[in-house]
Image: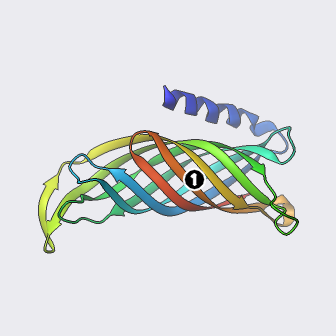
Amino acid sequence: MFRALLLLIIAFSSLAANAADFKFGFAADYGVVALDDPEGDGKQTGIFYGAALTGNYPLKWRDTSLVSGIGYMAGSSDASETDVGQDLAGYYVFSRFQTRSPLSRALPNLYSYIGAKFIGTTHKKRHTVYQGYIKEEFSNRDNSAFNLGVGLGYKFEHKGGRQSIPSFYFDAPITGKMLLVGLQYQFEF
């Protein structure tokens, strides 16, 4: 249900590609992932990175837009006696509503956003270690998560109508158990 709804939102925003103000772009992500593992003892944490193709459709309200995208993510977490080390790779689809939220005249292009993200990943090389040696190995597993996220970024305008938005975000899981805290650099042309 959530996957179909999210894909519908992405498709809807993609239909607007004929609009003159529609902007294509790309985004790069880097951050910390926290996930639950059935064989682990609590939450595993690791590092993730990602890259996405994005589309930005300006809405009628002043300085608001709908940003959607699809991307690839990968990452890993370290193993211990109780934490399961693993490599993860997969895709994500996101859509978010972003609006200009200036705090003062010194920060006129501050943007905030709220949105949703669907993540589908495969977890491989799952194992625990004891004194530097593999203690126990586990089979691969697939994971999916539907997250709600909030973020804060600053828009820089460049020549030719290009713009870049470095931002900080926090994605909390609604379904699945994958929490993301990260930095994103989005460039639109």
Is residue 148 in sight in this rendering? yes
User: Left or right of 142: which side holds 17?
Assistant: right
> For numbered disc 1, what is the local secondary structure?
strand
Expressed as whole percent of the image width and height from the top left, the position of residue 9 reads 63, 32
Image coordinates of residue 26 in percent, x first then y, are 64, 56
> Please, which residue is most extreme toward the top here?
1
Q: Where residue 175 sits in the image (x, y, percent)?
A: 43, 37
Type of residue at label 1?
Ala
- What residue occupies the far bottom of the structure in this picture? 131
Q: Which residue is located at x 45 percent, y 51 percent?
A: 179
Q: Answer few, some or many: residues within 10 Å of disc 1's Cα (few below 14, many 20 plus, some between 14 and 19).
A: many
Residue 32 at x, y = what percent? Answer: 45, 62
160 sits to left or right of 94: right
- How is the protein colored in the picture? rainbow
Residue 176 found in image quarter: top left
The image shows residue 118, relative to residue 155, as above or below, that is above
Residue under label 1: 52
Position of residue 185 in the picture relative to residue 74 (left or right): right
Residue visible at 27% across and 45% down? 141
The residue nearer to you, when weighing 87 against 102, is: 102
Q: How many marks?
A: 1
